[in-house]
Image: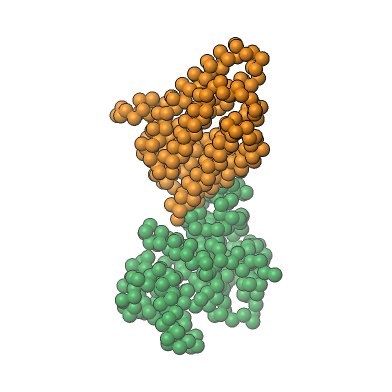
Amino acid sequence: MVDNQLQTTNLNLWFGNNHVLHDVNLGIKGKKITAIIGPSGCGKSTLLRTFNRMNDLIPEAKITGEVLLDGENVYNPKVDVTSIRTRIGMVFQKPNPFPKSIYNNVAYGLVIQKKYRKSEIQARVEESLKAAWIWEEVKDRLHESAMSLSGGQQQRLCIARALANNPEVLLLDEPTSALDPQSTAKIEELCLDLKNRVTILIVTHNIAQAGRISDYTAYMYLGELVEFGETNKVFTVPQDKRTEAYLTGVYG
Amino acid sequence: MLSDKILELKKQITEMAELVGRMVSYSFEGIEKGINHYSEVMDLEQEVNRMELEIEENCIVLIALQHPEAKDLRIILMIYKINNDLERLGDQAFNIAESVAQTVGSSLINQIPDLMSMKNFTLEMFDNSIEAFVNESVNEARLVCNQDEIVDSYNRHIYHQIVDLIKDNPANIHDYMHLLRIAKNLERIADLSTNIGENTVYLAQGRVIKHHQDEAAGKDVS
């Protein structure tokens, strides 16, 4: 039986000689929000990027250990990377819509798979834009350039783009650090709303944000998973002195 | 998000207050109707203690995770304090149940009719304090604070009555001491209800009215 939707087992990662992740064993529960926090350079984004094999794009990256998605090792040579990235969507720090229309941004992932009818794609685009809470703002301008949207809207468009593939997991790498407080609040509420349909992993520098939205918190320090537990517990009575120091602003 | 959680906390506080009110009413049924509810009151007290821990934990988690500010922060802090007061109210109610259990069947209570009036008045004051808190009503809260003196005078009056009764019937001193203890605990219930009133004014307006008799009486000293 697979308890955790995602699981890393003795995961180590090097960029050249730089040992970035040290024996990370982390289990992620399905349909929950897990926040990964820690000071800059602690490896939290690198860890996030191991789940959908984004580190494959870096030639000097070397990985040992396993990353399991529903019990299946995503690093198994037989696994199709594209299918992994369809199942595990990602949204980055800086909104990065394609220089295309709003509609085509969301439709793109479906179109290139060449297996959906136009009417299906239309329905999925609308459904995804609605799920990302941006439909009302863009429904009358679907064929305008995505670049005309505000930063907060662009970020919700990127979430819609990821949702269009019906992913099981959504990786969010500091999704609000380039946004104003109001857009940030909207994305946070959106995350809570999406929790019913998708597992969310969020890397954030904003400790308060991790507290507000996550069910579980992982604290990383110097490439090591120092502490992992229910956010309620980690934020009130952390078990490790290093977590306590980070949360209280002593360092990091 | 935060507002929903605060509403949930308020709901828990009213549930806990309802249990405390029931503890006092049950205890007095021993006096009024000769029904001994001691064990039910004991169960309720344990439930109140359990709720205290739960609400305390919820407040701590909410402060740690949601970083409440301004009125949100005041409400959570006051809920934390009211929660503590309610647990102590549960203790007072339990003390009453203990003393009632010792005097069940005694007709001596008929010699102190004011004790029943004091109980009714105190319970009403307690209910009003909770209602003021739920409605965040400054007027209702101040009214509760002003009623504390009335319960104090009941207490003084009953004390003197009981002292006289003991002089006349020293053989019944055991029962009289329990009746005196009941009055004393009612007086404490009124004190704690006053605390709830004061905390309600603070959560609604951010004004501290504790230890300021003039302000508590509603006279504007500013």
**Who is closer to the viewer here, B31 or A7?**
B31
Judged from this view, the residue extending furthest toward the right is A1
Q: Residue at x 58, y 44 (%)?
A: B51
> How was the colour assigned to the protein in this rendering?
by chain
Considering only vertical position in the picture, is B213 above or below B72? above
Any part of residue B198 in sight: no
Image quarter in which the N terminus of chain B is found: bottom left
Judged from this view, the residue extending furthest toward the top is B167
Q: Position of residue B177 (x, y in %)?
A: 61, 20
Output the letter for the chain in orange: B
Q: Residue at x 50, y 24 (%)?
A: B114
Q: Position of residue B206 (x, y in %)?
A: 38, 38
**Who is closer to the viewer here, A175 or B77?**
B77
Any part of residue A103 in sight: yes
* Tint applied to chain A in the drawing: green
Considering only vertical position in the picture, is A213 above or below B158? below
